Structure formats: C-alpha cells, structure tokens
Amino acid sequence: MRFLIIFVSLVTIFSLANSSIRPVQDFAVETAFQSGVPKSSDVLLSSRWFRPMNEDDSNCTMEAVRHFHPTIMAWMYLWRPNTRAGLALLKEQNLTIQAAIATGIHTSQEEAALNAKRDIKGDLIPWRWNTVHLCPNAPGTVEYMLPRAIHLLSLGARSIQVDDWDFWSFAQIQLPHEANPRLENCYCDYCMEGFRRFLQGRDSTYLKTLGVSELETFDYRQYVLDNKLPVNGIESELQKLFDEFGAESVDAFWHDFQKALNEAAGRTVPLSANNFAGIWQPISGPFAFGMSEIPHTIITPEFIYTRLRENAALGKGQVFTTLSRNAEQTRRFIATTTASGGNMIVPWDLFMGPDRPRYFGRPDNYSDLFAFIRAIPEYLDGFEDAAVAWHRLTDERYEERNPVTLPEGSEVFAVTRVNLAEKGGAAVIHLVDWSNNPQPFRIKLDVNRFTDKGDLDIELLIPAEYDEQLHQRAWSSRDYSEMVSKYYPNWSISANTAVVDIPKINPWAVLIVRQPWEAR
C-alpha cells in the first residue's frame, strides 16, 4: 500500500510538472489573410507572355506547365495575338489565371500627356522601355486602367497583379539591399491641388512656420524651387508632409480602384502587387498579397521568415520570385519560403533585371520540390507557424527551451507548423539545410511540447528524386503520391527529449510528429 501511495504521488508530481509546459499549438496564431491569397499547396508558374513568342523562341509555356506542376498561372500579360488560344489550353488544364496590369504607359499614347507624373519643371518623368508612370492623383488614371483590368477578367482571369503599384516610389521606401531610399516625387497640377487639400484643417500658425502663408494659393512646386530644396527629398518638415501625402494618395487610389473593379465584376477581385523584396511600408493598399522579386544578396532564412511573419501580421500573403541563377540557392529559397508560410514562383521565365536575359530554370533542378508541394497539401494548407529554430534567429515565444534543438553550428533552418483546427493533430517540422555540403544530422525535440502522453510517432517526408517519366505521369493523373519518399527515422526518447536522426537532405524534409497511436 505504501508503494502504491508513493507511485501515485510521483505520477501526480510528474503530471503537475508537465502541465506547466504549454504545447506548440498554444504558440501559433491564426493568420487572417484576405480572400485570394494562394494556398500553401499552390504552385505558381509565371509565363509573362505565352511562349514561343516567335520562331526564335525555344521556350514553350505548355511544356513548362507539364514539367512544373502549377495550379496558378501568375503575373501574365494577356495582350499578344496568341493570348486567346493559349488561355484555352491553360483552361483545359484547370489552371487559375492571374493577369497583370501596370502603372506605366507608353509615351506615344495620349493618356501620358494628361495623366502621367511630372517633374519639378512640369516635364514627363522618363522611365524605361519608352514608358512613363501615371499619377494616382490624375483623374484619368483610374479611367485608363480600370477598363484594361475588366477586359482581363472577361478573358478568364480570376485575379489581377499590379506591376509598379507604387507608381514608382510615389512616397519614400527604403529597400534592404539599397543604400539610399527610393523616392520620385510628382509635381503635376493634380498633386499640387491635392497637397493643398491634404494641408487643410492644420493650424494656420503652424503652416506659416513651414512657409505656407496663404494655403488657398500655395504652390508646393514653387516652394521647392524658391527654397532650393532637393526635388526628391524629405529634409524639411513640409517635405515630410508631402511624403505623407504621397503615401496616402497611392493608398486611396488603390482602394478606389478595388471598389470600382469589384462593382464592375460583381465579385471581389483579389489584387496583388510587386512589393519588391517583400516591402510594403509605408504604403500597403488593399492588396491581398505581394509578388516580390528579391535580389540573391538578401536571400537568407532570417530575411524570408521575418518578412513573411511581418506581412502575415498585415493580413497579406507573400509570393517570392528570385533574381538568382544559382540553382542550389534557389532550391533552398523555395523550401524556406514554403516552410515559412509563403509561396515561390517557379524559376522559369523570370525577370533578371533591365537588359539581362530572362531565366528559364530546368525541370531537373526544381520540379521535385514543386511536385513535393503538390503531394503533401494535408501538411501545408491551414498550418500556422508555432516555432522557428535558426542560428541567426531567436524565437522569443519560448523563454527557456525551443521545441526543436539543432546541432551546434548547424546550417539547418527549422520551422514547426500546426493546424489550429485539429486539436492534438500532427505538428509539421520543416527542415531546410542551407549548408554547401549537406550531411546527416541529429535534432532534439522537447517531447512535452508535442504530447502529454510521453511518447510520439515520427515520420519523415522527403521529395522523391527527379524522374521525368514519373513527373509526366503525376501531371497527367494529378496523383502525386509517387512524388514523396516516406521514411521512419531512427529516434529515441530519454528524459522527455526525443533524439531523431535525419539523413542528408537536398535541401528539404518534413518531419511529421504525432501523438502515439493509442492516444489518437
């Protein structure tokens, strides 16, 4: 009897100790994305124009479709003669179409003279490719762009991607890879009148200290010239206010545009925008998600993860596209982006910069990863970030011990994700090896973070090695079960720590951690 009492007491103490350890599911927060954000299991392929574009073009859009397993054809310009025939082929494959518009306009068109941005002298601001940018404060801008967007919807587009949505830095934006902020002010008459309205209601004495004596006749353009101020600067208080006016102008334009487009379509039309490097601030607009070109020099796990977390907090999804031709780096980028809750555009027909050839990645470099995404939607869709482990990040949600401990000096990036709709469901740990020479490694799991039963069931999923015939069969049948290799790695539990042996990965594996069978 005494032994039984002691045993029961020890069990009680153990249970009380464990009850203070919160499971990983408690640390995840549901993301309130806007309608139209791609699912984690979506694969986005962007053929900017249908290819081949001419007899010298060796690339083919439909071949890329068969090789890379897309669900969404993204960021497409649908104005060439072969558009309708190409769209018919894509619709036969049940692909969702996202068409693109831009805020640039050819200088030869009449609208440019009426609605384009103007410099301090009143001249059109030159850009590139014989185009200039429209001004969001010009009344004809929405009248020019809206019919084009409506036409794209009539062709079958479900959403619209906006290129150069900020009207080329209408307000100051600091990008992480650039030494200086971007800013290109517009000094057209519409902006001067709009700025006067923006200043209305402010204290007249305060405005006089800034140099605004008569607001009704104040001309900010002349103010900049008279005071010899930099035309694209925010050095003075009034310049800072003009920058705020610029941000508000862009934001207001896109909210008005979204409203008008929804009314014309009779539904909510998701908008996305190319927020370069994933940056939104100081302008965010009504966009459901960003489509971001990102320089290879800033592609790191910490940048990707942090950017996706910050944008999710805004309710915005994020799609990345790389400016790198390095296949190994891009593979790590794809895996890390998916692990962090975003999407990566297939590296095919990618813009590499002005006057540089576009990049067309090979299927044997990337298709295994995208087929893997298609193969495991049940471990991607609906899962939220619950923990991160990476040597250049600190997960402040866990004061003492991270649920996942990586080897000292490891170049492995780990994100734990959970489905909040499945209480007690599986935790999914994405592992991405960023080392140049991947090797097998060992991770440790805090068992109490994953179960209160003292035991686990563990399974490892890895992309199947690339085999062209298997990929063609998967695309034809839409059965992706052969695109994932399943393993039951060696592991053991001691002192509430599970030690799991992970084989060499190139670069991605997904560890499924479940309650033991008898507890389910």
Image (spheres, rainbow, N blue to C red):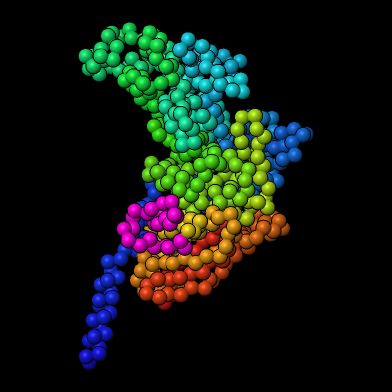
In this view, 315 is above or below 377: above
Where residue 106 appears, as percent x and y from the top left, is: 59, 20
The residue at the point 42 percent across, 62 percent down is: 404
Return the residue found at the far bottom: 1
The residue at the point 40 percent across, 29 percent down is: 251
In the image, taking residue 311 as reference, residue 333 lies left or right, namely right
Residues 265 and 353: in front is 353
Q: Quadrant of the C terminus?
A: bottom left
**How many numbered marks appear?**
0
The residue at the point 56 percent across, 51 percent down is: 332
Quadrant position of residue 286: top left
Where residue 353 appears, as percent x and y from the top left, is: 60, 33
In this view, 3 is above or below 29: below
In the image, taking residue 81 as reference, residue 257 lies left or right, namely left
Q: Quadrant of the N terminus?
A: bottom left
In this view, 283 is above or below 454: above
The residue at the point 51 percent across, 29 percent down is: 164
Return the residue found at the far front: 409
Answer whether residue 281 is magenta in the image.
no
Return the residue found at the far right: 55
Q: In terms of secondary structure, what is the magenta stretch mainly?
A: loop
Res 92 seen here = no
Where residue 508 appears, as percent x and y from the top left, is: 55, 58
Where residue 323 appears, as percent x and y from the top left, is: 58, 39
Answer whether residue 394 is magenta in the image.
yes
Quadrant position of residue 477: bottom right
Q: Which range is magenta?
A: 383-408
